[in-house]
Image: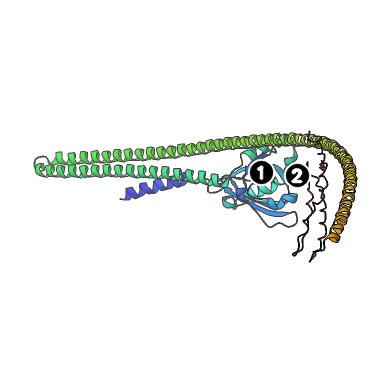
Amino acid sequence: MKKFSLLLLIIILANSAFAQNSGSAPKLESKEPSFVGFTGSFIRFGPVSGKERPFVMAVEYKPWFFEVSGTANAGSATSELDDDAIMVVAYYNAKGKTTSGVDYQSGYFDFMIYFDDEPVKISNLKFKLIGQAASASAGSATLAQAQTWNFEKGKVFKMPKYESPIIKAQAGALDKAELERELAVAKKKTADSIAREEKRVKDSIAREMKRAADERQRVADSIAREKQRVADSIAREKKRVADSIVREKQRVADSIAREEKKRQDAIAKEKKRVADSVAAYRQYVKDSLEQERIEAEERRKEEIARKRAEAAAKKKEEEARKKEEEAAEKQRKKDEEAAAKQKKKDDEIAAKQKKKDEEARKKEAEAEAKQRKKDDEIAAKQRKKDEEVEAKQKKKDEEARKKDAEAEAKQNKKKKPAVEEEEPPPPERKKRVRKKKPAVEKEEEEPPPPPKKQSVRKKPVEEEPPPPPPKKKRRPVVEEEEDDWWNN
């Protein structure tokens, strides 16, 4: 049991010695700067004051253990600063190692924020080591020395010489979420590997202990048999038994020594194999992380190139669309000019047509006036003729009435009737109304004179009345139709 405890203590001490390394102080060896980029997931912006805005960026991922603070001024875009910004840290290569064996960088001297690919003015810039590197006094001294080592604040980001590494740092900016995922994966792999190694070591120690126990049991059994054999033959071979016991003890001691040596050699080999395995695995993890970082940087570069290509394509599309709009505007102006010309032409045609219509109406009015005048002259002549005929007829009627009156007077003198009836007055002649529309008017016949009334007592001899004047056919009034010359 003591040997097992001693062996376990040796393994624990060996692992502790392997895991712990003495800290080493960083040194500024070169004045050539290096650059590393970080995404906006590491920075926090404070409230806006005018055109300035305070910020703090803290990073705690191996080998970056630092905090940078200051004031950003992006002009009118200060209020828009957010996680889309890219930060670039300039540093001199001054690596150190803490007492716990953690590597850290301490040569930080300048800092720049890029928002929409444009640099932002930085003031009141301060660096300090944090996390596992916060207790490294040598690292803090190196950090203070780096501030005045070679460059003034902001100067290195304006030099064309370092434009390419700055762009590479922006393209390969480290993201907090990706680093945490990679760190978690690496920790899990390391923990699993260490657990497997510890289990294997424990199993190996258990096997060695079992083998030693079996050997001790075998030796005890052998001693017991030998003692029994000596006891049985002590009488016969007392001296030989004593010698045999000495030889057997020596043989057992040698056997135990050999077994112990074998066991010690096996433990040393196992420790060496474990150490080599752990070193190889750590190298493998380191190479894997480096390869993954390179691949991530390549992917980020490809993503930036793709975004730039998309931006260029979008710009070309905007220019093409603008040209199409200009062409459409020119075509619209041409169409409006053509429409204006056509409208002017139509207005001129309409004015000419209106003038022609006015002239035609004027001619039609003149023709109608002439026709009306002609009709009035014809009607006046016809009225004059009718009046003359009517006057002649009236005169003849008067003469006939006179004759009738004279004849009646003569008859009355010859025979006096008992009762005389008054002769009714001659009927009035109806006035003729001349119609303009009908082509031929119907002839109006004069009514015959009424018969004379006789007395009741004695019927006088009736004389035949004079024949009525001959009926004259009146000339039909014909109204000339207007020639529809416009329609024809």
> Image quarter for residue 320?
top right
Q: Which residue is mark 1?
A: 88
Query: Relative to residue 111, is residue 225 drawn left or right?
Result: left
Q: Is residue 93 visible?
A: no
Farthest residue to the bottom: give it: 419
Amino acid type of the residue tagged 1 in the rendering: Val
Query: Relative to residue 434, is residue 52 drawn left or right?
Result: left
Estimate the x, y position of residue 153 in percent, counting from the top left: 74, 46
Q: What is the basis of the colouring in this image?
A: rainbow
From mark 1 to mark 2, how far is it between C-alphas? 16 Å
**Which of 390/140 is in front?**
390
Callout 1: few (<14), some (14-19), or many (20+) C-alpha neighbours within 10 Å?
Answer: many
Contact flag, marks 1 and 2 (Cβ < 8 Å):
no
Farthest residue to the front: give it: 414
**Which of 16/357 is in front?**
357
> Image quarter for residue 199?
top left
Amino acid type of the residue tagged 2 in the rendering: Glu
Vertical order, 68 against 481 (above or below)? below
Question: Mark 1 vs mark 2: which is more N-terminal?
Answer: 1
Going 75% across and 50% down the picture, which residue do you hit? 75
Query: Relative to residue 123, is residue 61 drawn left or right?
Result: left
Q: Is residue 326 visible?
A: yes
**Which of 4/383 is in front?**
383
Estimate the x, y position of residue 274 in percent, counting from the top left: 41, 40
Going 38% across and 39% down the picture, which residue do you hit? 270
Q: Which mark is residue 152?
A: 2
